[in-house]
């Protein structure tokens, strides 16, 4: 049972707006990361390892050596969360992926500058609200159709 009551039309519009904006932000991030030179991901990992971090030096050396694997994990999370939030398919899982990705990027400092750290953190907080307090895909999303179906229990949690 969601905590935010959706019997009022304004709350439904609010949940839908937050879901779509979050999906568009992550989709834009995917487009930027798929640009030339993988969105300078390798350079950002190397720069991050040279500065002061909370991670041990061994972990940072592994991250620099295996930057492409980290890139694939990050881009996969961003693709899954953006598609899930934009279409409303298993949108609670997409909100969880988006929250984890946003906090992870914000904590690791993988943004290009200050604005690229503020955006993931703010979107992560919004999607955390979606994940904890609502069922975002049930409003004009594929989850509204899936909710009525006889799905396995594991899938019913995420719709």
Image (cartoon, rainbow, N blue to C red):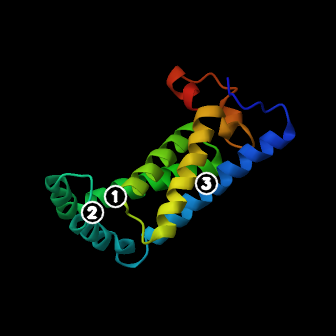
State how far apart marks 2 and 1 are (Cα). 6 Å
Query: In the rendered structure, are the residues bearing label 2 and label 1 in contact, judged by CB atoms less than 8 Å apart?
Result: yes
Badge 3 density bin: few <14, some 14–19, many ≥20, Cα 10 Å: many
Residue 85 can be seen in this image: yes
Residue 69, by quadrant, is: bottom left
- Residue 78 versus residue 5 in the image, above or below: below
Q: Residue furthest left?
A: 58
Query: Badge 1: how crowded within 10 Å, few (<14), some, or many (20+)?
Result: few
Label 1 residue SS: helix
Q: Residue furthest bottom?
A: 36
Do residues under tags 2 and 3 come within 8 Å of each other at their CB atoms?
no
Give the residue at x 51% y 41%: 96
Q: Report, in whole angstroms, how far the alpha carbon at label 2 lies from the one at label 3.
A: 25 Å
Regarding mark 2 in the picture, which secondary structure is present there?
Answer: helix
- Residue 112: x, y in percent? 42, 71
130 in relation to 158, above or below = below
Query: For the point 58% across and 37% down, which residue is it?
Result: 131
Q: For mark 1, what is the residue?
A: 72
Residue to which mark 2 is pinned? 68
Residue furthest right as drawn: 9
Q: Is residue 82 left or right of residue 100?
A: right
Position of 132 with respect to 141 (left or right) is left
Q: Which residue does the image show at 68% across and 50% down from the upper left?
A: 18
Q: Nearer the viewer, residue 153 or 66?
A: 66
In the rendered view of the protein, which quadrant contains the N terminus?
A: top right
Question: Mark 3 highlights which residue?
Answer: 22
Query: Would residue 64 be found to the left or right of residue 144 on screen?
Result: left
């Amino acid at each position: 049972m969601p905590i935010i009551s959706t019997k009022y039309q304004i709350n439904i519009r609010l949940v839908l707006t937050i879901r779509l904006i979050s999906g568009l932000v992550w989709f834009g991030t995917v487009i930027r990361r798929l640009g030339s030179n993988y969105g300078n991901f390798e350079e950002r990992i190397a720069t991050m390892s040279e500065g002061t971090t909370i991670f041990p030096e061994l972990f940072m050396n592994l991250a620099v050596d295996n930057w492409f694997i980290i890139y694939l994990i990050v881009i996969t999370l961003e693709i899954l969360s953006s598609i899930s939030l934009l279409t409303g398919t298993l949108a609670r899982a997409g909100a969880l992926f988006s929250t984890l990705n946003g906090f992870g990027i914000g904590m690791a400092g993988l943004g290009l500058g200050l604005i690229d750290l503020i955006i993931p953190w703010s979107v992560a907080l919004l999607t955390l609200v979606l994940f904890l307090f609502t069922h975002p895909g049930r409003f004009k999303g594929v989850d509204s159709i899936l909710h009525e179906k006889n799905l396995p229990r594991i899938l019913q949690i995420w719709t």
